[in-house]
Image (cartoon, rainbow, N blue to C red):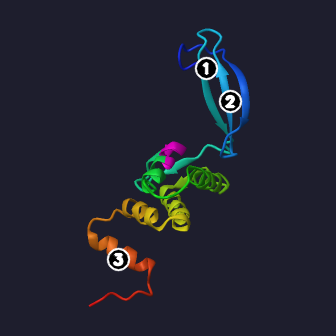
Amino acid sequence: MRCPFCGNVDTQVKDSRPAEDHVSIRRRRFCPSCGGRFTTYERVQLRDLVVVKSSGRREDFDRDKLERSIRIALQKRPLEPERIDQMISGIVRRLESMGETDIPSKTIGEIVMEALARIDTVAYVRFASVYKNFQAADDFDKFVSELRPDVKPED
């Protein structure tokens, strides 16, 4: 592992243990060249995934990009960070275990919406507004009314 301070490629692991999410390993490292200390996290990756956009463009799957979009939807919501990390890890495991390396972005969006719907309705609507490209307030109204089909609109 390259030292982030001096670039030395010969760093030493001082301590290893499971991270709080229990799906990655936290390693404390030391650089003998500059004396710098830093932490790395390692997680299992079953296969390299490629996202196929609706335009046909292909790009490598980026867990950090997925995490950023989910955290934006969950901003200021009363959820523990561990619960969010577990949800993200579950989504990534589900994608990796699908058996395909090429995954349509639409499939990823549907899986994320499904996961958000289970843990927070507000985040679900926030994510859906971007994913489904809402253009007007009526789009929100229609979507929310589909969440509650038993509620009749007032005249």
Which percent across, then down, holds residue 73? 43, 56
Is residue 64 in the magenta section? yes
Image position of 3 with respect to 56: above or below: above
Give residue 17's quadrant in the image. Answer: top right
Element under disc 2: strand
Give the left or right position of residue 66, taking residue 43 as reference.
Answer: left
- Of circles 1 and 3, the one toward us is 1
Q: Residue furthest top?
A: 33
What distance separates the C-alpha of mark 3 from that of mark 2? 48 Å
Query: Sequence order check: which comes first, mark 1 or mark 3?
Result: 1
Query: Which residue is pictured at 73% across the width and 31% down the height?
Result: 16
Which percent across, then down, holds residue 28? 66, 26
Which percent across, then down, holds residue 145? 39, 79
Query: Who is closer to the viewer here, 70 or 62?
Result: 70
**Label of residue 94 in the image:** none
Query: Which residue is pictured at 54% across the width and 20% down the height?
Result: 4
Image position of 75 with respect to 148: above or below: above
Query: Who is closer to the viewer here, 139 or 155?
Result: 155
Q: Quadrant of the N terminus?
A: top right
Q: Quadrant of the C terminus?
A: bottom left
Q: Is residue 62 visible?
A: no
Amino acid on which disc 2 is placed = Arg
Residue labelled with disc 3: 142
Which percent across, then down, holds residue 55? 40, 54
Stretch in magenta: 59-67
Query: Are circles 1 and 2 on residues that touch, CB within 8 Å?
Result: no
Residue labelled with disc 2: 27
Element under disc 3: helix
Is residue 6 in the magenta section? no
Residue labelled with disc 1: 37
What distance separates the C-alpha of mark 1 from that of mark 2? 11 Å
